[in-house]
Image (cartoon, rainbow, N blue to C red):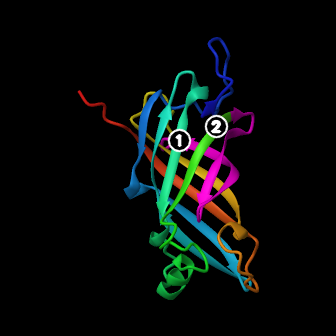
Amino acid sequence: MLVTIMRPGIQLQPGTPLRPAAGSWRVDPAQSHALFAVRVAGRPVQGRLSLTGRVLIADPVEDSTARLAARASQLSTGYPVLDRQLTGPGFLDAGSFPEISFRSELLAWVPAGWRAVGRLQVKGAVHELACQLDVDRDGDLVNDSSHFRITSRWILDSRWITRQWIPGVSRHVTMTCSFLLRQAQVPG
C-alpha cells in the first residue's frame, strides 16, 4: 500500500519523486532480480534470484498493494556446488518451500524518500520487513509512464534462511531488489 503527502496545492521540492499512475502493473521477470551479498569466512559471496509479481497503484494511494515472488530453486551464485547447498534442506529447502515472497502492507513517502513495510515469507515463515525504495524511469518523471524501475534495499537476518550455525557467516544478508514495472494490459 502506498502513502504519500502529495495533495493538490502542495508544491514538491525539486527532485522529489512522483508516484506512478494509478493502475495495474506487472513485474517484468526478464529485467527484475534480487541480488544478495553475505560474508562467509571473511569473504563476500554474491547471488541472484529472478523476480516476478504484480503491483496495484490505487487512488487513494493508501489502498495500493504489491507482491513480489522468487523461485528458491533459481538461486544462482555462479558456483553450482554452493547453489545446491544454498537451495538444499539446510538452507532455503527449495524442495519443500519453492517460493520466497514479499507482500506490501504499507508504502510511504517520507522526507527521506519512499519506504515499504511488509511481510517476507521464507521457508514457510513470515517476517516483518522494512525497506527503502528508489523509483526511477531512467531519469524521467514517473507520472504517466508505461514503465519504471523500483530499486529497494533490504537487510535480512540470516537465521530466517538457516538455523544452522556456520562459522564465519555474517548474521545479516544484504539484498538489493531491482524490478521493472510495466503497465498491465487491460483486456478490451
In this orientation, which residue lies closer to the viewer: 114 or 104?
Answer: 104
Residue 187 location (% of width, % of height):
26, 31
Residue 121 location (% of width, % of height):
60, 57
In this orientation, which residue lies closer to the viewer: 66 or 42?
Answer: 66
Left or right side of 43 for 95: left
Q: Which corner quadrant holds the C terminus? A: top left
Residue 66 has which mark?
A: 1
For residue 120: magenta? yes
Secondary element under disc 1, as helix, strand or loop, is strand
Find the magenta span and give its range.
Answer: 109-138
Please tell me how many numbered marks the rendered image carries.
2
How many C-alpha atoms fall within 10 Å of the one at disc 2: few (<14), some, or many (≥20)?
Answer: many
For residue 177: magenta? no
Residue 38 falls in image quadrant: bottom right
Residue 182 location (% of width, % of height):
39, 41
Residue depicted at 53% across the width and 41% down the height: 66
Left or right side of 81 for 28: left
Characterize the magenta stretch by its predominant secondary structure: strand
Q: Earlier in the sequence, mark 2 or mark 1?
A: 1
Secondary element under disc 2, as helix, strand or loop, is strand
Which amino acid, by three-letter code, is at mark 2? Leu
Residue 113 location (% of width, % of height):
69, 38
Q: Which corner quadrant holds the N terminus? A: top right
How many C-alpha atoms fall within 10 Å of the one at disc 1: few (<14), some, or many (≥20)?
Answer: many
Q: Are marks 2 and 1 in contact (CB under 8 Å)?
A: yes
Which residue is disc 2 drawn over? Answer: 107
Residue depicted at 66% across the width and 27% down the height: 4
